[in-house]
C-alpha cells in the first residue's frame, strides 16, 4: 500500500510569489491534514479537510488556504510569500476524522519550501 | 488554547542507558495522546497512542508511555536505548477539536 505522497519535495520561491503544494493520501483515506514544521515554532496545525470540506483551521493568516478534491487529494496554497514561510510542510492522512485505536494519521515526507 | 510542553529539548545518552522524555499538556478534558518519532531523513511515524484504559501504553521498538491524568503528563520511556533510537521525538494531543497539537520536540542523540 503506497504511503502519503507530497509533491514537489523541494521548492525555492521569492518573496511575494505564491506556491501550491500537493498531497495524495493513502488510498481509501478521506481525511487530510496539513502542518507547518519550523525549527522555531515546531509542528503547527494548518488545516484539516474531510469530504472536500475544511473542518478545522489553525492560527494562520488568510494567505494560507487549501482544498480537497473528490478523490481526497489535497492542495495547499500560500500567497504573497514571506521569508517566514520557509518551512517543511507536512501532510497527513487518515481514514476518518477522529483518531481511534484502529485509525491514525500517516505522514508524508513533506515539501521543503525555501523563500528567498 | 491547548498547549503541549516537552521540557527536554536535547538529550544525549549512551547506548543501554534508560530514557524518559517528559510531556505535559494543558487541556483538562478527555484527551487522546500520542508520541511520534522522526528519524533523520524519514517521515514522522507513530510510536504509540493512548485513548483509554490501561494508562501504561506499549508501542513499537520497545517504547512505552504512562498517562498520569492528575499530572497532565504522558512521559515516554525506554529501558535501554540503542544508537538507532537517535531521532526527534514529538508528543501530541488531540483535543478538544480534533486538531493534533504537538510539543516542541526532543532531539535524542544516542552515543554508541
Image (spheres, rainbow, N blue to C red):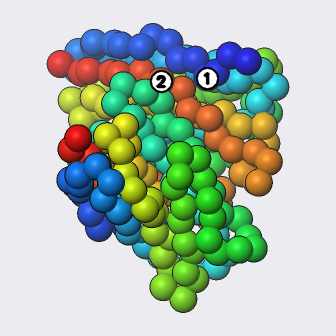
In the figure, is residue B52 to the left or right of A14? right
Query: Is B15 on the left or on the right of A105, as rendered?
Result: left
Neighbour tally class for label 1: few under 14, some 14-19, many 20 plus, Cα within 10 Å: many
Q: Vertical placement of B28 versus B109: above or below? A: below
Alpha carbon distance from label 1 to label 2: 8 Å
**Coordinates of residue B87 in the picture (x, y in percent):** 34, 41
Residue A63 occupies quadrant: top left
Residue located farthest toward the front when viewing the structure as drawn: B16
Badge 1 and badge 2 both on one subunit: yes
* Residue A95 falls left or right of residue B82: right
Q: Position of residue A89 (x, y in %)?
A: 43, 30
Q: Chain of mark 2?
A: A
The C terminus of chain B lies in quadrant: top left
Of residues A91 and B36, the one drawn nearer to the viewer in this rendering = B36
Q: Secondary structure at mark 2?
A: loop
Q: To which residue does mark 1 refer?
A: A4
Q: Is residue A97 above or below residue A1?
A: below
Q: Are marks 1 and 2 in contact (CB under 8 Å)?
A: yes
Please give the count of numbered marks on the rendered protein. 2
| Residue A48 on image: x %, y % | 63, 41
Relative to A90, residue B50 above or below: below
Relative placement, left or right, of B63 versus A54 is left
Q: Is residue A69 visible?
A: no
Quarter-wise, where is residue B29 in the image?
Answer: bottom right
Question: Which residue lies under the disc numbered 2?
Answer: A109
> Residue at position x 38%, y 17% from top?
A18
At x 36%, y 61%, the residue is B19
**Which residue is at the front of the view, B35 or A75?**
B35
Q: Position of residue A26 (x, y in %)?
A: 71, 23
**Above or below, B29 relative to B112:** below
Determine the residue positioned at 37% across, 51% down. Answer: B81
Task: Mark yes or no: residue B12 visible.
Answer: yes
Amino acid at each position: 500500500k503506497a504511503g502519503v505522497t507530497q509533491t514537489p519535495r523541494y521548492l525555492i520561491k521569492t518573496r511575494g510569489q505564491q506556491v501550491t503544494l500537493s498531497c495524495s493520501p493513502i488510498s481509501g483515506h478521506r481525511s487530510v491534514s496539513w502542518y507547518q514544521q519550523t525549527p522555531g515554532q515546531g509542528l503547527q496545525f494548518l488545516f484539516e479537510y474531510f469530504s472536500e470540506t475544511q473542518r478545522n483551521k489553525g492560527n494562520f493568516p488568510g494567505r494560507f488556504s487549501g482544498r480537497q478534491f473528490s478523490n481526497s487529494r489535497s492542495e495547499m496554497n500560500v500567497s504573497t510569500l514571506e521569508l517566514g514561510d520557509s518551512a517543511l510542510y507536512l501532510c497527513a492522512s487518515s481514514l476518518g476524522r477522529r483518531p481511534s485505536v484502529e485509525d491514525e494519521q500517516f505522514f508524508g515526507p513533506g515539501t521543503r519550501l525555501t523563500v528567498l | 488554547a491547548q498547549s503541549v510542553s516537552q521540557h527536554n529539548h536535547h538529550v544525549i545518552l549512551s547506548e543501554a542507558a534508560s530514557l524518559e522524555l517528559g510531556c505535559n499538556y494543558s487541556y483538562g478534558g478527555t484527551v487522546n495522546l500520542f508520541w511520534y518519532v522522526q528519524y533523520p531523513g524519514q517521515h514522522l511515524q507513530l510510536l504509540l497512542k493512548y485513548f483509554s484504559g490501561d494508562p501504561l501504553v506499549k508501542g513499537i521498538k520497545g517504547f512505552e508511555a504512562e498517562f498520569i491524568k492528575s499530572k497532565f503528563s504522558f512521559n515516554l520511556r525506554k529501558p535501554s536505548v540503542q544508537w538507532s533510537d537517535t531521532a526527534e521525538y514529538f508528543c501530541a494531543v488531540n483535543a478538544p477539536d480534533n486538531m493534533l497539537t504537538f510539543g516542541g520536540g526532543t532531539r535524542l542523540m544516542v552515543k554508541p
